[in-house]
């Protein structure tokens, strides 16, 4: 079923959407300008040791001031769509009333995109919760879901005439389990219960906002972006490894997929999470709200995982999904640091090549993932698939002009595009691909140390230089064809 990716020319269907993706906090800077107030990432970046080198988002890529140039750059690269996020902390600072200056920034950005024939692909939440709402419990607090709807409707009132595709959340797994349990992301919590509660409240926020947007704008395309892993047992004959893979899949993938597409948490997920209070936060009617029909599912894919039920003596077991080792928690029921949830799951190396993040390169996992989603979730409901993030960090070495000949990143994207095409050929309704990322940016807990851009950013001068991967991707976007290797 899954073809091994070849090396010949590969043509995508006409109308396939080619884009790049970014997120507000990672590129905008201007953190205290235009009425913006702190988000949880501004506060987290001040915690000693939370972000590599003490980096923060105060300047980032200065996109807030350079957005017109950045849009011109996208046009030069022939890009048809731009996936960006709006900052809740800019639009409703402190979680309070709308801030016209903040809204206006996004209005100007959208006009600039439309003027260049680029489809604005807007994500409402890419992790920058107003710090003031975190102080009221953040995503642990059910009320935050209702505040999210207020914010979503502020954006829709301002931009609904021009933005036709709306994504509620980016990667709620990260904003729940990685943020409230794993401690690696803001606000840096270490409680399994908090992670589970945050996860449910994020799903509720998604459902409530989808309902409200649908009612206000029946013609808009609505979706959510999830991050997935492809969880394989190290030894498919070993029941403990099979069980570990099931658990990983349950928390990473099905915790979100089943409520959204099937209107229920799967029984095995309920069993895994019952000790952490899932039942305490699910109220009557929540699952109906969460399963409000969608038009699109955004798929973020970076890597798969080989899982074992047996602890390894090596340090593999002490490496989380991001490849980083989060600070050890002091509270709650931790067995072995640090894979937040689930317990009894150990990551093993497969000896595949790795990116600078330490993530294994496994393109065929993307083919399998897209086919599974099509078959089990989106296909039967007529929901379109879009790859909303895929890309790689490598240790770039610019020449004296700032040019980076990043053949490694180019090859990574090439292989994954071939994997997408294999899925399309096998029947997956994939309609677009967004490379992560348009440009180097603030890579969360890794600060500016990890570079994902197809455009280099010189953080001294803030100058942008298209990398070899960017030139190549621009050609793919122009022609719809991945050239022979
Ligand atoms: C995604 N993990 O983040 C985000 O959507 C982007 O903002 C980010 O820059 C990109 O992927 C690259 O990291 C993730 O630990 C961060 O498993 C961490 C993990 C997964 C996704």
Image: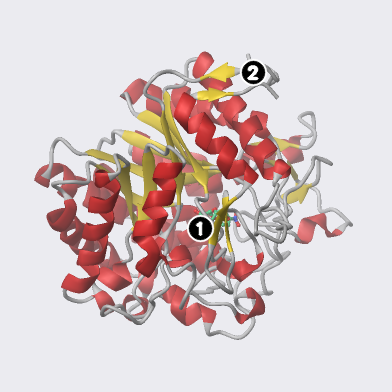
Let me know if residue 125 appears in the view. Answer: no
Q: Residue at x 68, y 21 (%)?
A: 5
Return the residue nearer the eye: 302 or 314. Answer: 302
| Residue placed under numbered mark 1 in the picture | 174
Question: With respect to residue 262, does 389 lie above or below?
Answer: below
| Residue placed under numbered mark 2 in the picture | 2
Task: Give x and y (percent) for residue 115.
Answer: 25, 45
Q: Is residue 371 left or right of residue 469?
A: left
Q: How many marks?
A: 2
Q: Is residue 237 left or right of residue 193?
A: right
What sort of colour scheme is used for the picture? secondary structure
Q: Residue at x 47, y 75 (%)?
A: 59
Task: Give x and y (percent) for residue 288.
Answer: 25, 42
> How far is the residue under mark 1 from the one under mark 2?
29 Å
Q: Residue at x 44, y 43 (%)?
A: 76
Task: Give x and y (percent) for residue 242.
Answer: 70, 36
Answer yes or no: disc 1 within 8 Å of ligand 1: yes
Quarter of image, res 126: bottom left
Determine contact: label 1, label 2, CB under 8 Å: no
* Extreme-right residue of the structure: 313
Q: Earlier in the sequence, mark 1 or mark 2?
A: 2
Return the residue nearer the eye: 410 or 144. Answer: 410
Where disc 2 sits, the SS reads loop
Quarter of image, res 277: bottom left
Let me know if residue 153 appears in the view. Answer: yes
Where disc 1 sits, the SS reads helix
Q: Residue at x 79, y 28 (%)?
A: 237
Return the residue nearer the eye: 51 or 100. Answer: 100
At label 2, counting other C-alpha atoms closer than 10 Å, the crowd grade (few under 14, some 14-19, many 20 or more) is some
Looking at the rendered image, the quarter that the N terminus falls into is top right
Question: With respect to residue 76, does 151 lie above or below?
Answer: below
């Amino acid at each position: 079923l899954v073809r091994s990716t070849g090396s010949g020319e590969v043509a995508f269907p006409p109308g396939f959407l080619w884009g790049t993706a970014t997120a507000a906090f990672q590129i905008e800077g201007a953190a205290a300008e235009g009425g913006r107030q702190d988000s949880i990432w501004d506060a987290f970046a001040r915690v000693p040791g939370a972000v590599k080198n003490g980096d923060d988002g105060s300047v980032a890529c200065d996109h807030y001031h350079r957005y017109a140039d950045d849009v011109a750059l996208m046009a030069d690269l022939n890009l048809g769509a731009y996936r960006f996020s709006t900052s809740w902390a800019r639009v409703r600072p402190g979680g309070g009333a709308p801030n016209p200056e903040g809204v206006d920034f996004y209005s100007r950005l959208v006009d600039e995109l439309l003027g260049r024939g680029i489809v604005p692909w807007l994500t409402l939440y890419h992790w920058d919760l107003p710090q003031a709402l975190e102080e009221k419990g953040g995503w642990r607090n059910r009320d935050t879901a209702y505040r999210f709807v207020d914010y979503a409707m502020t954006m829709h009132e301002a931009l609904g005439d021009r933005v036709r595709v709306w994504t509620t959340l980016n990667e709620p797994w990260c904003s729940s389990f990685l943020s409230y349990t794993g401690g690696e992301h803001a606000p840096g919590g270490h409680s399994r219960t908090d992670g589970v509660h945050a996860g449910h409240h994020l799903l509720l926020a998604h459902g409530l906002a989808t309902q409200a947007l649908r009612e206000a704008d029946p013609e808009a395309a609505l979706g959510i972006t999830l991050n997935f892993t492809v969880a394989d047992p190290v030894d498919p004959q070993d029941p403990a490894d099979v069980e570990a893979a099931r658990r990983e899949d349950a928390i990473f993938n099905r915790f979100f997929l089943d409520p959204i597409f099937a209107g229920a948490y799967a029984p095995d997920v309920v069993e895994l999470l019952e000790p952490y209070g899932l039942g305490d936060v699910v109220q009557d009617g929540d699952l109906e709200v969460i399963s409000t029909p969608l038009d699109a599912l955004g798929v973020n894919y970076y890597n798969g995982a080989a899982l074992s039920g047996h602890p390894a003596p090596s340090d593999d077991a002490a490496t989380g999904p991001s490849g980083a080792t989060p600070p050890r928690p002091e509270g709650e029921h931790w067995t072995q640091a640090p894979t937040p949830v689930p317990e009894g799951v150990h990551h093993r190396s497969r000896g595949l090549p790795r990116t600078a993040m330490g993530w294994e390169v496994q393109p065929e996992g993307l083919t399998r993932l897209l086919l599974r989603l099509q078959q089990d979730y989106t296909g039967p409901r007529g929901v379109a698939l879009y790859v909303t993030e895929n890309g790689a960090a490598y240790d770039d070495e610019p020449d004296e002009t700032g040019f980076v000949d990043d053949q490694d990143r180019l090859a990574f994207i090439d292989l994954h595009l071939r994997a997408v095409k294999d899925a399309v050929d096998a029947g997956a309704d994939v309609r677009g691909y967004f490379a992560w990322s348009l440009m180097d940016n603030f890579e969360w807990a890794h600060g500016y140390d990890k570079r994902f851009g197809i455009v280099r950013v010189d953080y001294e001068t803030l100058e942008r230089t298209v990398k070899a991967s960017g030139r190549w991707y621009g050609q793919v976007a122009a022609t719809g064809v991945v050239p022979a290797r």
